[in-house]
Image (tube, helix red, strand yellow):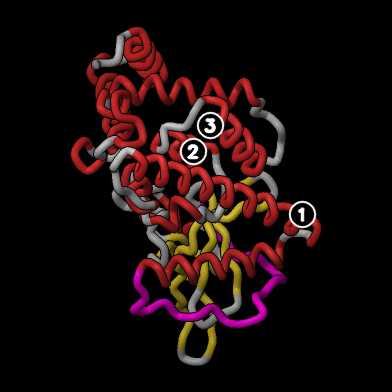
Amino acid sequence: MASKRIYKRKTDVYPNKSFYEGRINLNKLGIPIGWYYKEEGKRSKWRILNAGLIQIGITNHVLGMCPNRKEIFLGRDGKLWRYKNVLLPTPVPDVLGCDREELNAWADACAREVIDRLTPGNEASVSERSQYRYRKIVQALVNQRILDSAAIGYECTALTFAQGISVEWTAHDLLFPRHATIRHATLVALVLALEADKAAQLIELAALIEMRIPFVSREAALSIYQQACSLLARLCPQWWNQGYTCRWELVGDIDRIFRAQYIRMIEDAWDNGTQFETVGGIAIRNLINSEPEE
């Protein structure tokens, strides 16, 4: 049925089934997300690869690239299309045989070229400076925690903190995110166990860069961090006791801890026959009203 819905619309770009149904992991760069059809010699079908997320205006899009071609493809909500009348200056390099680090470099280079082509010059310049400032702040906070850890005899690196957030993260994911987001800032603040004021500043900056609208004030950012701390403290008492020296390889990363809680909330909704948001509110209220274990 999904395949029929995909090909019902007559166009030159079609998403694959995984992308259309929202089952694809967009953090995996270089994987296929669709097909581009164009008669060119004997070949008429070109594979579109995932180059990660890019922000155009206030909206995030999935960036798709065809190796050895200049077309730009964007996706959102299971839809995929070609950005018409704009081409890249040079063909996209092939990624066959590339490792994860090389894929990151390939995707970042593609994103920069696309943003330069689609975004007004002044906006692109301001956005790039903002992203650079955010990354430098994150690097400074991580380096300070490495020094703090060494002062008490605990050896760690940026990779240690990155894998505390997710075992799939590298130091590059922690220190050089393509886009600053509230999610990234909150996770960084949690794994570094930042003081409330520093965490609120980081989250406020990330929110401004991500939304490009000053929705999130310092007070709202502080509330986000305090809520996140309350939940993590109850789900992972070791973090509550040990802070930035928590042994994540023993207790599991933050992503796994929160993902497990999310699954429990979904299952409770099914088992009780209640709305998901209602069960979510009950679960959060119960966690907040309980005391962290010492």
SS class of the residue under badge 1? Answer: helix
In percent of width and height, residue 109 lies at 56, 70
Q: Amino acid at mark 3?
A: Ala
Q: Hey, which quadrant is residue 147 in on the image?
A: top left
For label 2, count other residues whose C-alpha is less than 10 Å away and answer few (under 14), some (14-19) or many (20+): few
Taking the image as drawn, is residue 1 in sight? no
Residue that carries the numbered disc 3 in the rendered image: 199
Q: Hey, which quadrant is residue 285 in on the image?
A: top left
Residue at (40, 15) in percent of width and height: 281
Residue 99 in the figure: left or right of residue 137: left
In percent of width and height, residue 177 lies at 51, 53
Residue 74 in the figure: left or right of residue 105: right
Q: Earlier in the sequence, mark 1 or mark 3?
A: 1
SS class of the residue under badge 3? Answer: helix
**1 and 3 marks in contact (CB < 8 Å):** no
Q: Amino acid at mark 2?
A: Arg
Residue at (24, 16) in percent of width and height: 294
Q: Which residues are magenta?
A: 79-99
Residue that carries the numbered disc 2 in the rendered image: 183
In percent of width and height, residue 42 lies at 46, 91
Residue that carries the numbered disc 1 in the rendered image: 123
Cα distance between the residues tagged 1 and 3: 27 Å
Residue at (50, 80) in percent of width and height: 93
In percent of width and height, residue 37 lies at 51, 74
